[in-house]
Image (cartoon, grey):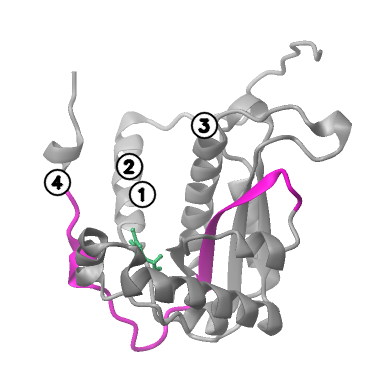
Amino acid sequence: MQEHHTVALTDFIEYPPQEMLERSVQFYEQIKRRHSIRQFSDRPVDRQIIENCIKAAGTAPNGANHQPWHFVAIQSAAVKKQVREQAEAHEQGFYAGRAGDEWLTALKPLGTDAHKPYLENAPWLIAIFSQKTMGTDSDKQQNNYYVHESVGIATGFLIQALHHAGLVTLTHTPKPMSFLSKICQRPDNERPFMLLVVGYPATNATLPVHALNKKPLNEILTVM
Ligand code: IYR
C-alpha cells in the first residue's frame, strides 16, 4: 500500500471578488456557444490540438486517481469508414423500430436519422473507453471506482477543451457500441463509453431550434 505524502498547493490563483464574478459570466458566455453539430467540414485539424485537449481531459477528478479512461483519436480515413459503416448499420435498426415509439418521438425535434456522413468526413473521431480494472495483466486486475462518473467528467473536460480551442463536437453513442472495441483493438478490461466527432462546422451548418431551449436557472437550481 502507498503512503499518504503531501506537497504544498502552489498553483491556486485567487481572484478579487469582482473579477471572480466577471470570470463566471465570461465562462458562461463562452460555454453557451457550445453546440452539438451534425454537419462537419472535412478541413483538417492539427494532431497537436487534439493531443492537448486529451491532456486536459486526463486532469479530470476520478475514483482513487486510477484515471480509468483511454482515448483513441482516429484520423485514418479507412478506420473512420469502418466506424461509419458499423455505426450506421446499428442505427438503421434503432430508427427502424428498436428504439421504440417514445424514444423516436423524443428525437423528432433533433432531426436525427441513421445517416452519419460526419463519421467519415470530420477530421477526427475520438473513441472514449472506460476501464473496469487497472489492466488485464494479473498484477493490474485491481478494481477501478466510480468509473462512469470519472469517464463522464473527463469527457466533459474534453468537450470543453475542444470548444475552447475553437472546434465543434458531436457526442455520439451508437447502440450497441461494442464494435468500437474491435475496430480500436481495445483490451477486455475496457468498454466503449462514447464517440466524439471533432472538427470544424460545415459552412452551412444548422442547429435544431429544439436544442437551443435551455431550462432556466430556477428550474435547474435549488438553493438551500
Ligand atoms: N444514437 C442515435 C440516436 C440518438 C439518441 C439520442 I438520446 C440523441 O440525443 C440523439 C440521437 C443517433 O445518433 O442518431
Q: Amino acid at mark 1?
A: Phe
Mark 4 element type: loop
Q: What residue sits right under mark 3 in the picture?
A: 13
Q: Within 10 Å of the Cα at label 3, are there few (<14), some (14-19), or many (20+) other Cα atoms?
A: few
Depicted 7 relative to depicted 126: above or below? above
**Residue type beneath disc 2:** Ser
Look at the numbered discs 2 and 4 and tell me whether their residues touch, using CB distance below 8 Å: no
Q: Position of residue 150 (x, y in %)?
A: 55, 37
- Sequence-wise, which precedes: disc 4 or disc 1? 1
Q: Ligand 1 is found in which quarter of the picture?
A: bottom left
**Earlier along the polypeptide chain: callout 2 or callout 4?**
2
User: What is the C-alpha distance between the residues marked 4 and 3?
Assistant: 30 Å
Which of the pair 32/159 is nearer the observer?
159
Q: Which mark is residue 24?
A: 2
Q: Secondary structure at mark 1?
A: helix
Residue range in magenta is 187-215
**Quarter the N terminus occupies:** top right
Question: Is the CB of mark 3 within 8 Å of ligand 1?
Answer: no
- Sequence order check: which comes first, mark 2 or mark 3? 3
Q: CA distance from mark 1 to mark 2?
A: 5 Å
Tell me residue 139's x, y (percent): 87, 29
Residue 74 location (% of width, % of height): 67, 71
Q: Residues within 10 Å of mark 1 (few under 14, many from 20)?
A: few
Q: Is 181 in front, or is 218?
A: 181
Q: Amino acid at mark 4?
A: Pro
Residue 27: give its label: 1
